[in-house]
Image (tube, rainbow, N blue to C red):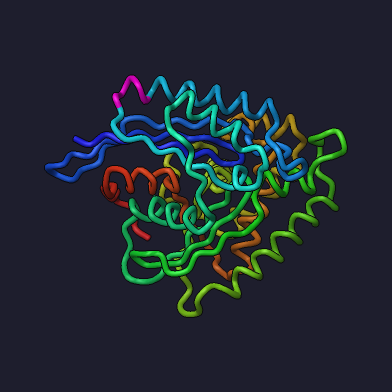
């Protein structure tokens, strides 16, 4: 048996996956999965530095993960950091804290590598026939698009994300606002449209790909549509579903969004911007339906550590 663990630390959340591969059969078994909203990238776009409170939240989650990793006697551990960590001037404090707690130095991956891992994780457990797939991974600080069949063809990383656009356009001078203004919403749309138009020009021409959505914004919008977080993997959403769920969140005030049970604590303020990115992508790319994947970068990283996950019966 080969037992591995991967930690993915993004702008908004930090996640752990522990899995074991049977060397004889090749079967991969998931042993533990954890996710915590830590907002590591809080204020990074404005200050270029990590906030002390954000580091404390992140290190507390790392300590929790260290207990899980120790209890399961993990042999291989990888820790990757994405958009927020690429952008800061004081990353050494973050590196030192993670190494002290988990015994591993974080690997800051590029947007292209993030896209490749997301593609492998998102599509590895979804069966499909021939033809291209386009994985859309909406993170807190960046959004990745990657086109491929069995392997990555073209990868594009965009400097838009749910936290980044919320802090840029949907907050007031003193922080988060109770209700979003029409002007702020329009500004998010403009930024998303401009970025996605640039991305569309770099994507290959040909038959429309199957669009696979990854990340907390996508799964949360899907949960809002369904009214539950169960059974989201492989779910198909139409553009009208995405638009209706997004408009519901944009009309609601903070307390109303926080009261929606399927939205994780800490995500209610940023998922409306993520929903706008998703809607804009579907409109700009001319793809009317998205397949939700609850797998992604984390699963791709574990794939790299222990082997390919066993597909589950979801057809693309």
**Would you place residue 251 above or below residue 315 in this image?**
above
Q: Quadrant of residue 194?
A: bottom right
> Farthest residue toward the left?
24
The C terminus appears in which quarter of the rendering?
Answer: bottom left
Is residue 245 in view? no
Return the x and y of residue 176 as percentages of the image width and height.
Answer: 79, 35
The residue located at (60%, 43%) in the rendering is 85
Which is more toward the observer, 210 or 107?
Answer: 107
Residue 194 or 63: which is nearer the viewer? 63
Q: Residue at x 66, y 43 (%)?
A: 88
| Prevalent SS, magenta region | helix
Measuring from the top left, give residue 156's x and y in whole percent.
Answer: 55, 64
Residue 71 in magenta?
yes
- What span is in magenta? 69-73
Q: Is residue 194 left or right of residue 73?
A: right
The location of residue 224, given as percent across then percent down, is: 58, 41
Q: Residue at point 62% right, 23% down? A: 56
Q: Nearer the viewer, residue 87 or 227?
A: 87
Where is 109 relative to 290, above or below?
Answer: above
């Amino acid at each position: 048996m080969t037992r591995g663990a991967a930690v993915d630390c993004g702008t908004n959340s930090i996640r752990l996956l522990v899995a074991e591969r049977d060397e004889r059969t090749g079967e991969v078994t998931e042993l533990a999965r954890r996710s915590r909203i830590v907002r590591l990238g809080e204020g990074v776009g404005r200050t270029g530095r990590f906030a002390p409170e954000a580091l404390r939240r992140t290190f507390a989650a790392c300590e929790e993960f260290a207990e899980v990793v120790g209890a399961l006697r993990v042999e291989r551990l990888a820790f990757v950091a994405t958009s927020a960590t690429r952008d800061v001037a004081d990353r050494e404090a973050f590196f030192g804290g993670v190494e002290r707690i988990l015994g591993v130095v974080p690997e800051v991956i590029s947007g292209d590598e993030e896209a490749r891992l997301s593609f492998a994780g998102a599509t590895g457990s979804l069966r499909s026939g021939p033809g291209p797939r386009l994985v859309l991974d909406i993170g807190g600080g960046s959004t990745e698009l990657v086109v491929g069949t069995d392997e990555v063809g073209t990868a594009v990383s965009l400097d838009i994300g749910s936290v980044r656009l919320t802090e840029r356009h949907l907050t007031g001078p003193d922080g988060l606002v109770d209700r979003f203004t029409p002007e702020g919403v329009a500004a998010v749309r403009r930024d998303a449209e401009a970025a996605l138009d640039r991305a569309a020009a770099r994507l290959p021409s040909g038959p429309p790909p199957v669009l696979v959505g990854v990340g907390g914004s996508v799964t949360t919008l899907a949960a809002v549509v369904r009214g539950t977080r169960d059974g989201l993997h492989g779910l198909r959403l139409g553009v009208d579903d995405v638009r209706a769920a997004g408009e519901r969140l944009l009309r609601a005030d903070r307390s109303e969004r926080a009261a929606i049970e399927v939205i994780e604590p800490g995500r209610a303020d940023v998922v409306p911007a993520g929903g706008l990115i998703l809607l804009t992508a579907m409109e700009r790319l001319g793809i009317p339906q998205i397949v939700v994947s609850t797998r992604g970068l984390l699963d791709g990283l574990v794939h790299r550590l222990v082997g390919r996950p066993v597909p589950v019966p979801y057809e693309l």
